Image (spheres, helix red, strand yellow):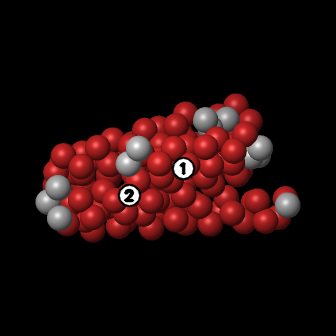
Amino acid sequence: MSYQNAYDGYHAVNLDTQTSRASPVELVLLLTDGLLDELARARAHIVARRYEQKAISIDKCLEIINGLSGSLDFEGGGDTVTNLARVYEFCANHLHRAGIKLDPAMVDEVTRVLSTIRQGWKGIQDRNG
């Protein structure tokens, strides 16, 4: 077994452990943290001109964004949820264009927006224990 396979196995078990006992807010934070990590990889792939890896990273990011958006409670969330859905849609569209234009600054903008959203979720977690 290679080092990378061992690391991937450990990471999968660790993630399973974290998600099995996480609250909904903690799950959003875990997903957002993973998304931010993958955005950094996508940006690095653009800068290094590793286009195949860039495409894979952007696809992973889009899957996470779509998962976050798809889990929103539109019936109970009101305007806040509607606005959050719009922000996720902006991020997905902007990231898609960043991949086409090969523009790391566009990835940076998505990262800033999602980091702000993460801070909001973290504030909710801190207030609710």
- Examine the rendering and report whether any part of residue 90 can be seen: no
Residue occupying the point 30% across, 56% down: 42
Residue that numbered label 2 is attached to: 39
Residue occupying the point 18% across, 46% down: 52
Q: Is residue 4 above or below residue 64?
A: below
Residue occupying the point 55% across, 66% down: 116
- Examine the rendering and report whether any part of residue 2 can be seen: yes
Q: Is residue 20 above or below residue 119?
A: above
Q: Residue 36 appears at what percent x and percent y?
A: 46, 59
Q: Residue 111 appears at what percent x and percent y?
A: 42, 63
Residue that numbered label 1 is attached to: 11
Q: CA distance from mark 1 to mark 2?
A: 18 Å
The amino acid type of the residue labelled 1 equals His
The amino acid type of the residue labelled 2 equals Leu
Residue occupying the point 52% across, 37% down: 67
Q: Earlier in the sequence, mark 1 or mark 2?
A: 1
Q: Residue 15 appears at what percent x and percent y?
A: 61, 46
Drawn side of residue 16 relative to residue 22, left or right: left
Drawn side of residue 96 relative to residue 69, left or right: left
Q: Secondary structure at mark 1?
A: helix
How dense is the environment of label 2, judged by Cα within 10 Å: few (below 14), some, or many (20 and up)?
many
How many numbered badges does the structure rendering display?
Answer: 2
Q: Residue 41 appears at what percent x and percent y?
A: 34, 59
Q: Nearer the viewer, mark 1 or mark 2?
A: 1
Q: Nearer the viewer, residue 12 or 90?
A: 12
